[in-house]
């Protein structure tokens, strides 16, 4: 469950001051959204993948849904809403390939609860889905109505700053993904200093995504595994974290140990950073 967006990716040599102007050197339009990116990558990996999301009743929404369907994603749970455009994100990419996002969530936040699909083995929830509107209510109900399947969640900065919400996750997850920026905020607001402390508190795996430094994985018992990054020349880090998450989920579904999950995740995250946009177009057998 997660966002479906249209991404405008622009390469800027510098940020303008407030009220100023700055021309982009290059710009691209891409399909995006954390939930959609993860679903797309899992489908490429050969997983039967269904996405719960919401788009506007507009041509952009049609294009975004068609793109997911073309990649083999089951789009039957994607809803459409009148009076609100599909989600839009303007992504500024620096000379180092690092991305900064300016987002309008649009139709995403109107996702209505219809219950989880039947016969699923894992339910992944994007943290953005817990921020506002009907989508937040839907995500909370999915967390509360846990069935006989694995449950994973990808953190976002607003959630990391909300220590009260952290209590709602105790005992509900099998795996939490969190990046370095989010963990820094969580540390400031909760006092939790190590991912092993977070894993112990939540009672699940915690995966710290560290970008060019790889990842760190802790079990609920406090066993920590570190996986180094692969050396790549990053072009655009948009969606690299989503590809990482998809890779980890793929191995987790197969019952792989944390280190193998992390190795697959790091490989896909590195591959995604060498492309423009949040989608890997095709994968080899490795």
Image (cartoon, helix red, strand yellow):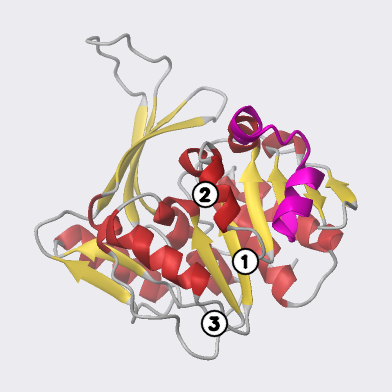
Q: Main secondary structure of the magenta part?
A: helix
- The residue at 30%/69% (across/down) is 65
Is disc 2 in contact with disc 3, using a CB cutoff of under 8 Å? no
Mark 1–mark 3 distance (CA, rounded to whole Å) = 24 Å
Q: Which residues are magenta?
A: 186-206
Relative placement, left or right, of 218 versus 115 is right
Of residues 77 and 200, which is closer to you in this image?
Answer: 200
Say few, some or many: other residues with alpha carbon within 10 Å of mark 3 (under 14 / 14 to 19 / 20 or more).
few
**Residue found at the far left of this picture:** 83
Residue 220 position, x and y percent, is 81, 58
Q: As drawn, is 282 to the left or to the right of 194?
A: left
* Residue 1 location, quadrant: bottom left
The mark that comes first in sequence, 1 or 3, is: 3
Regarding residue 1, the answer to whether it shows in the image is no
Q: Say which residue appears at 75% left-offset and 33% top-offset.
A: 193
Neighbour class for label 1 at 10 Å: few (<14), some, many (≥20)?
some
The residue tagged with tag 3: helix, strand or loop?
loop
Q: Which residue is mark 2?
A: 165
| Mark with earlier residue (2, 3) | 3
Q: For the residues marked 2 and 3, what is the alpha-carbon distance in whole angstroms? A: 31 Å
User: Furthest-right residue in view?
Assistant: 223
- Residue 151's place in the image compared with 118, above or below, is above
Q: Is residue 192 magenta?
A: yes
Q: Quadrant of residue 213?
A: top right
Residue beneath label 3, please?
Answer: 48
Residue behind mark 1: 172
Q: Is residue 61 magenta?
A: no
Quadrant location, the C terminus: bottom right
Label 1, secondary structure: give it.
loop
The residue nearer to you, when weighing 11 against 169, is 169
């Amino acid at each position: 469950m997660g966002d479906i967006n249209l991404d405008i990716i622009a390469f800027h040599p510098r940020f303008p001051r407030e009220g100023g102007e700055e021309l982009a050197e290059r710009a691209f339009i891409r399909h995006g959204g954390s939930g959609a990116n993860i679903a797309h990558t899992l489908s490429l990996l050969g997983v039967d993948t269904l996405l719960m999301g919401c788009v506007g009743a507009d041509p952009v929404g049609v294009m975004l849904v068609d793109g997911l369907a073309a990649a083999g994603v089951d789009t039957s749970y994607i809803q459409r809403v009148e009076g609100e455009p599909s989600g839009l994100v303007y992504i500024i990419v620096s000379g180092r390939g690092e991305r900064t996002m300016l987002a309008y969530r649009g139709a995403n936040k109107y996702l209505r609860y219809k219950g989880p699909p039947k016969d699923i083995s894992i339910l992944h929830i994007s943290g953005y889905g817990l921020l506002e509107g009907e989508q937040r209510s839907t995500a909370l109900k999915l967390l509360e109505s846990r069935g006989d399947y694995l449950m994973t969640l990808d953190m976002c900065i607003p959630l990391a700053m909300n220590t009260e919400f952290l209590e709602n996750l105790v005992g509900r997850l099998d795996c939490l993904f969190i990046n370095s920026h989010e963990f820094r905020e969580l540390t400031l607001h909760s006092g939790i200093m190590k991912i092993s402390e977070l894993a112990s508190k939540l009672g699940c795996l915690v995966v710290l995504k560290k970008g060019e430094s790889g990842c760190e994985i802790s079990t609920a018992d406090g066993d920590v595994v570190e996986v180094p990054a692969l050396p790549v020349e990053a072009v655009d880090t948009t969606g690299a974290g989503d590809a990482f998450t998809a890779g980890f989920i793929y191995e987790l579904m197969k019952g792989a140990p944390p280190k193998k999950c992390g190795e697959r995740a790091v490989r896909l995250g590195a591959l995604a950073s060498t492309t423009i946009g949040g989608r890997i177009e095709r994968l080899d057998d490795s």
